């Protein structure tokens, strides 16, 4: 320890402080204002080969001929500590430099440097970044796959016009919808909201698309069959699929539907009529043994529109914690007489504006909306 410290605090106190600092695994050294090493602890001394260190220039002890270009100690005259990373003999150190002031005068007499070896941490960080990059690539591929399963507006009929907007709140979403031709007279359509988000939710949407029997002309039977198949696969209690499934008969203008737990039901409307297709039903899950799905049929006519959506849009909240809600959706649908795609885009704009957010990317739940117009 420097003579001044021994004079002020005594030999015993200085020896005690030195023992504490020598017991640290981090390297510790004290550097004078002319860049000379005044003190170095045991860890640093042994790591540098127990060579003569005291009195030498700080950079010379590290095997360098000139001061470090990113030195934080030569000009560290502030009260706050400064930090940097430094490579020494192939190892990476996090270096923290703090001023050491004279107890009597308050002037800076030296600088204390603490060097913490972060080589393994850096290697772990690089490996983690590689894994994260691979995960991002995998998620991106999964997203492309999920999006590729969405409808392509390729119905072989001129009896309906169909548009949708699908905006997951994460890379992979828990919402899903589909519309497809069953035969010359029937069009199947469903919208679903599965439990959770991310990979698990995405896998459930893919299960739904492959497991639903699209040949059945009874939505209730299709949902019952899906329920049975879901339970045969042994999914956990936390997983479920809420789905509203309907079949449009374009020859006799009827719509037959059943609901498996979707808490927001489609809306069918025209200039002089509006009806919310509420129906009971248990989500596709393993919660009960034998669910009973209720099937209903209503008449439809030319120019009728069917609006399908999940709860992501109605649960959007503003700064006063009020929901966008079903009423605002109904009001928009009744006021707007645009092409289905424009009707949906304006609805999303209204919801984002209501939330007082700048972008739908800030929304915390998936947003999925669809509109079918009977021609």
Image: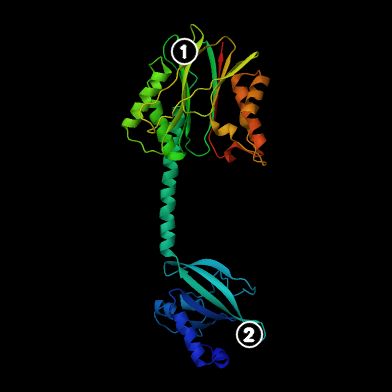
The x, y position of residue 50, in whole percent, is 40, 82
At 67% from the left edge and 35% from the top edge, which residue is drawn? 354
Residue 141: tell me if it is visible. Answer: no
For residue 318, which quarter of the picture?
top right
Distance between the alpha carbons at the discs numbered 1 and 2: 88 Å
Left or right for 369, reference 125: right
Quarter in which the C terminus is drawn = top right
Left or right for 369, reference 215: right
The x, y position of residue 44, in whole percent, is 44, 77
For residue 134, which quarter of the picture?
top left
At 65% from the left edge and 37% from the top edge, which residue is drawn? 322
Label 2, secondary structure: give it.
loop
The x, y position of residue 93, in whole percent, is 47, 68
Asked if 322 appears above or below 154 in the picture, the reply is below
> Most extreme residue toward the left, as rendered?
232
Give the mark nearest the N terminus, 1 or 2.
Answer: 2
Q: How many labels, in total?
A: 2
The dot on residue 156 is 1
Front residue (pair 28, 52)? 28
At 49% from the left edge and 91% from the top edge, which residue is drawn? 12
For residue 112, which quarter of the picture?
bottom right
> Callout 1 environment at 10 Å: few (<14), some (14 to 19), or many (20+)?
few
Front residue (pair 287, 110)? 287
Q: Which residue is mark 2?
A: 103
Asked if 275 appears above or below 79 in the picture, the reply is above
Colouring: rainbow
Residue 232: tell me if it is visible. Answer: yes
């Amino acid at each position: 320890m420097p003579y001044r410290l021994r004079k002020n605090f005594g030999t015993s106190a200085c020896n005690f402080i030195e023992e504490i600092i020598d017991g640290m695994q981090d390297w510790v050294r004290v550097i004078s204002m002319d860049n000379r090493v005044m003190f170095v602890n045991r860890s640093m001394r042994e790591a540098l080969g127990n060579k003569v260190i005291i009195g030498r220039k700080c950079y010379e002890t590290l095997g360098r001929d000139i001061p470090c270009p990113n030195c934080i100690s030569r000009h560290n005259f502030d009260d706050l500590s400064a930090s940097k990373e430094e490579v020494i003999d192939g190892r990476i150190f996090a270096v923290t430099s703090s001023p050491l002031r004279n107890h009597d005068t308050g002037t800076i007499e030296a600088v204390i440097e603490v060097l913490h070896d972060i080589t393994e941490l850096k290697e772990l960080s690089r490996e983690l970044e590689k894994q994260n990059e691979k995960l991002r690539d995998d998620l991106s591929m999964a997203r492309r796959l999920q999006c590729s399963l969405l409808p392509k507006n390729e119905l072989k009929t001129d009896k309906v016009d169909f548009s949708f907007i699908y905006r997951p709140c994460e890379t992979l979403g828990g919402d899903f919808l589909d519309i497809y031709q069953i035969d010359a007279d029937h069009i199947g359509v469903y919208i679903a909201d599965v439990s959770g988000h991310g990979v698990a939710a995405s896998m459930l949407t893919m299960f739904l698309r492959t497991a639903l029997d699209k040949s059945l002309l009874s939505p209730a039977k299709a949902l019952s069959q899906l329920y049975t198949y879901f339970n045969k696969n042994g999914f956990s209690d936390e997983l479920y699929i809420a789905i509203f499934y309907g079949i449009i008969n374009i020859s006799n203008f009827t719509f037959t539907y059943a609901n498996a737990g979707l808490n927001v039901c489609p809306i069918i409307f025209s200039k002089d009529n509006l009806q919310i297709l509420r129906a009971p039903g248990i989500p596709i899950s393993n919660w009960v043994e034998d669910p009973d799905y209720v099937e209903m049929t209503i008449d439809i006519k030319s120019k009728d529109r069917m609006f399908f959506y999940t709860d992501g849009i109605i649960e959007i909240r503003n700064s006063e914690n009020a929901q966008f809600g079903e009423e605002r959706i109904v009001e928009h649908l009744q006021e707007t007489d645009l092409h289905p795609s424009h009707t949906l885009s304006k609805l999303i704009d209204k919801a984002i504006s209501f939330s007082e957010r700048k972008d739908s990317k800030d929304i915390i739940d998936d947003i999925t909306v669809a509109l079918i117009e009977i021609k």
